Every structure is written in C-alpha cells, then in structure tokens.
Amino acid sequence: MDLFGEKRILTVSQLTSLIRGVLEENFEHVWVEGEISNLAMPSSGHLYFTLKDAGAQLRCVMFRASTRALKFKPRDGMGLIVRGRLTVYDQRGDYQLLAEYLEPKGLGALQMAFIQLKERLAKEGLFAEEHKKPLPRLPRRIGIVTSATGAAIHDILNVLNRRFANLEILLYPVRVQGEGAAAEIAGAIRDFNRLAAADVLIVGRGGGSLEDLWAFNEEVVARAIHQSRIPVISAVGHEVDFTIADFVADLRAPTPSAAAELVVRSKGELATEVDSLVHRLRQVMEHRLAEFQGELQLLSRSLKDPTLLLGHLSQRVDDLAARLTLALRGGEERPSQRLQFLVNRLRLQNPGVEVERGRELLLGLENRAERAVWRRMDSAREGVAVSAGKLEALSPLSTLARGYAIANRLPDGAVIRESGQLMAGDRLSLRFFRGTALCHVESCKD
C-alpha cells in the first residue's frame, strides 16, 4: 500500500524490471565456480550454458563480443571460474549470469588453449616426423621473420656474421606479440614461399611470458609453418619455453642464437672438411694406383718367358727330327701323307706364333690399366675442382673482387657497416681485393 492506504498494483514487466535493477545493482561484479553443462553456441556467436554444483544450478550467457576473446574452447563437464554480473531475462522471468570472462578451473585460459590446440594439431599429423624437411647443408640465403628492433635479430646477426660473414640475409620485420602479430608472422612465411626468396627460414623472438609468446601458439602460424616449402627453424624464447610453432617446425632451436648456430656451419669448419676430403681423395687415388700396378705385375709374371718357350719348342722339333731320321734309317717307308702331317704339326707349334700372341695380350693389359688410371684421375680432379669452386664462390675475397671493400676504423680495427659509426676526422683502412688504402673521414651522411 502507499501512504494513503491505496494498493500499488504492478505489471509483470514492472516487477521484473524492479527485480533486475536490484540484482544488477547488488551483484554487478561476481565470481562463480561450477561445472559447465547444456553448452550451446548458435550461429549468433553467443554462448549459452548452465553452471552447476551439487546443490544448485545457474543459467549463464556470454555474448559474442566476449566469446571472441576466449583462448580455449569450453566443453560440457569442464570446471569453470566465471566472472560476470547477475541480470534478469525478461521474456522468461529467469535470472541469469551475464558472463564476461571464463577461466578453466585449475588451469589458466592460455594454458588450456595451448593444450587443446596441441592435441588437435597432433591428431591432424602436423607434428609428424615424416613432414619434417631437412635443412640445406650450405644455404646461400637465410630468411628471418622477427621484430626488427628486438634482441633476437641482433643475436642472430652477430652469430651469423661470426660464422659466415658473406651470407645473404633477408629480414622480414613483423610484430611478435599483441593483436595481429600472428597474422603478420604467418603472412611473412607465406610471402617467403611465394617469392622463393630464401633457402631456409628462422622464425622467432626473444624470451617472455606465456602471453608475450602467444602469437607463436596461434593456429594461423602453425598452419603457415606446416605448409611452407622452405625449411623452418623455430627459435622462440628461451630453452625452457615451448610453443606450438616449435612442434610444427622442421627444427626447434632453444634460443635465437642457437638457431643461427644450427642454420649454417662456420666457414672454418667447411674449409677443414674440404681439406679432409682432398686428403681422402688423394689417398684413394694412390691406393687404386697401387692396386693397378700390383695387378699389372701379376699379369706380367703370369706370361711365360719367350726364350724358355722357344727352348721347349726347339727341343720338341729336335726330338721329332731325330725320330724321323731313325725311321728313315730303319728303312721304314712312310707315306707322303704321314710326312706332310708331321710338317703341318711342326708349323702349328711354331714358337713365333705363341710369342706374338703373348705380346698382344701384354699390350692389351697395359692399355687397359693405363686407361683405368687416367679415368680415375680425371674423375677425382673434377670433384676437387667442383669443391674448390664452391668454396671460392663463398669466399669473402670473391666479394671484394667484384669491386667491394672492407672498411676498418683505426686504431681499434672495428668493421664499419653504416655511416653512423663514423665521425669527422676518423681514420679508416680500406681493404680491396688487392692491397689496402688509408683514408680520413671529412664528413658523414646517413
């Protein structure tokens, strides 16, 4: 009743509106935990579910604007911690919790999202070993996808310059954290592949929190790495940090500096290996030549001495002649056919024929051995020339021969890469392909 004793009659809508005002005013910011059930997400993008425990249940709704920020996918039976405000749905007269933030109970939202995406991509086979591509043995061009101002790019460039100074390096600068970073990283990987601009890619950034590294846990980055035809090295954070990109990449490096160590061997190591190969090749050639010489000597020894052969044959002729003489002296009559037969046998056993055959066989064996030795030497010489050519093409001297020069500041000898390192009056030593020159800096321009 009012002050004058008259009844105040409310409509259902008015009463519901009053109740909603009371709830929204007194339960504007609440945290609730429970088990999710009756989960539904229609085409509108809103999320509808019931939060329950052993004694009660609460209807909940999360509008599309809030669901877009979810890093994980809620499921029936999952324990949740929900932040929101109480309100009333007028059409049904039900009170409900308008959820603004969801967090898995016992795990952070990012950690749950990481686990869910890892399990899903593993089932699709994105982490399988058969998809891993080998790194090139000696890349000529290395692509790097990272921030242009972060510590990672400086660490990578320092290591690469120390190991192999004249490698060609292409930097594709991207954001590595924050909104839109994942799309930029994935786009950079796709651009490198579209242009075939590198032999191998290093994708990564320096250390940070799970939130800082999250761009490398996004599905769009994982898909881009998996679809890359260029081998990808993932170099995200520190050794203890693991991201989805690490599992998809062809090789995981514990740090950006380690990625630079893995992508190319030092020039000194390569030169040592070439020297070792040349030494092994020389040993193989000498061994094969010794084998051929041994075979030639063995074949030579197997040939009979022509003088000995002639002696045996002459002895045989004398024996036959003596027998013929005895037969004639004994008055034995031999038909002319028998005499002719003996003469023919003597001709067939002529020692000159056997000597000529032996000489031809010896010459043939000598020619074969000589041709085999020269073929071996030509093949080995070509291999050494190819290896030497590759090493020469990568030598810094070949770069100087094309008209470039190396500038060193005096007296500390620092290598100058940009004019900002110099001041007027500085002394420089310029090294050319042949010879050096001493210069004085009069002025500097960017």
Image: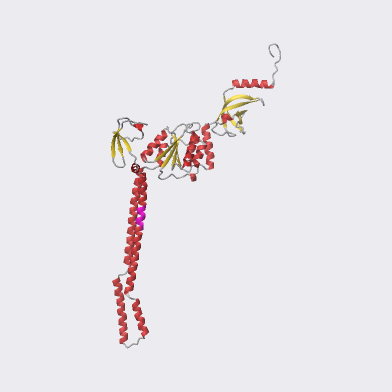
Colour scheme: secondary structure
- Point 31% across, 66% down: residue: 301
In the foreground, 132 or 148: 148
- Point 67% across, 22% down: residue: 13
Q: Main secondary structure of the magenta part?
A: helix
Q: Is residue 380 visible?
A: yes
Establish if 386 lies above or below 176.
Answer: below
In the foreground, 203 or 302: 203
- Point 35% across, 83% down: residue: 339
Residue 406, percent from left and from top: 33, 38
Residue segment shown in magenta:
375-382
Indicate whether residue 376 is drawn in magenta: yes
Residue 240, percent from left and from top: 44, 35
Quarter of the rendering occupied by the C terminus = top left
Residue 435: image quadrant is top left
Residue 297, percent from left and from top: 31, 63
